[in-house]
Amino acid sequence: MSSTLNENQLKLILQGISIPPQPQIMVDLHMEQAMPDPDMARISEIISQDVSLSAAVLKLVNSASFNLPKKIASIQQAVILLGPTSVTNIVNGLAVKSELSDDAIQSLHSFWDTASDVAAICSSLANQLDFKYQDECYSLGLFHNAGIPLMLKRFDGYQDVLKQGYQDPEFNLTDVENQAFKTNHSVVGYYLAKSWGLPKSCCAVIAKHHRVDYLFRHRVPGDSINLTFASILKMAEHIASTFRHIGGASEDYEWQKVGHYALDHLELSEYDFEGMIEVCHEQGIGTV
């Protein structure tokens, strides 16, 4: 699904699906960031107002995936060291979990655990690759499947269709969803990410994150960064065994289909990839 759809087309596609409003903390942070000279103290204050979110930010920035030289003890330290943009991207990602958790996804018991794992792995892979958009990679990892809980709330039988798509050796998940519901979780996730003001790179990849082969076969000038985001995401999903936890599949048919694109784009061999997986496992992330 193209990320160039206009608002009217998207509203038709999403008919009957309720897109929750952007959390107020994200609104406040975006407003402060838009100022000519963002106030670091004000950004710290906004984040500190949400105790659980503050704790999550500190836990994240002190995790092995960020590999910071010293332990961060306060939100203000995190903002100063990482910069307001990085911290805001992290908060954006973490806010998704608190806003979209719902009884409707209790049937997918490991949904957020898997999303958190993918996010941490994305961040680790970005660090290992010296890809400077490490925090955006974290947000992408946490947010990429955010359309799933909204689809679960809207459509009876969605989980069965989701598993059907993951368990098909041809792996055409979004086609299976489109046939059943006339939309898919990538489109829903894209619209949610767009309406919440997440980075454009995240939105673009979310829109086609199950059509990575299409992205690589139809490259456009200047799209190398988005292809890197997509490659890192697919690697992270494979390491986290998303195919098993979300799709109930015994094999990662999507990785079999698109993995070579990701590795070729990043100029990695299978041996290189195995080494990166080991680093993730040493950091306590990924399925061992």
Image (cartoon, rainbow, N blue to C red):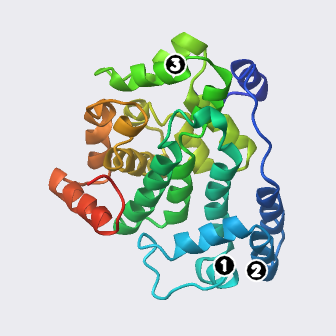
Residue at image coords 75%, 34% = 19
Residue at image coords 45%, 47% = 114
Mark 3 vs 2, N-terminal side: 2
Mark 1 vs 3, N-terminal side: 1
Instruction: Pinpoint residue 248: horizontal percent, then vertical percent.
Output: 36, 30
**Of the numbered discs in the image, which one, if any, rests on residue 79?**
1
Residue at image coords 29%, 35% = 252
Instruction: Pinpoint residue 18: horizontal percent, then vertical percent.
Output: 76, 30
Q: Foreground: 26 or 272? A: 26
User: Of the residues shown, which amino acid type is indicated by label 3?
Assistant: Glu
Residue at image coords 53%, 32% = 107
Q: CA distance from mark 1 to mark 2?
A: 7 Å
Mark 1 vs 2, N-terminal side: 2
Q: Would residue 210 appear left or right of 83 to someone viewing this image?
A: left
Q: CA distance from mark 1 to mark 3?
A: 40 Å
* The quarter of the displayed image where residue 9 is located: top right
List the residue tagged with mark 3: 177
Determine whether label 1 and label 2 are within 8 Å by CB. yes
**Of the numbered discs in the image, which one, if any, rests on residue 40?**
2
Q: Foreground: 210 or 242? A: 242
Q: Is residue 198 visible?
A: no
Q: CA distance from mark 3 to mark 2?
A: 44 Å
User: Of the residues shown, which amino acid type is indicated by label 1?
Assistant: Val
Q: Is residue 138 visible?
A: yes
Q: Is label 2 in a helix, a strand or a loop?
A: helix
Q: Is label 1 in a helix, a strand or a loop?
A: helix
- Closer to the eye: label 3 or 2: 3
**How many numbered callouts?**
3
**Of the numbered discs in the image, which one, if any, rests on residue 99?**
none
Q: Is residue 247 above or below residue 87?
A: above
* The quarter of the displayed image where residue 36 is located: bottom right
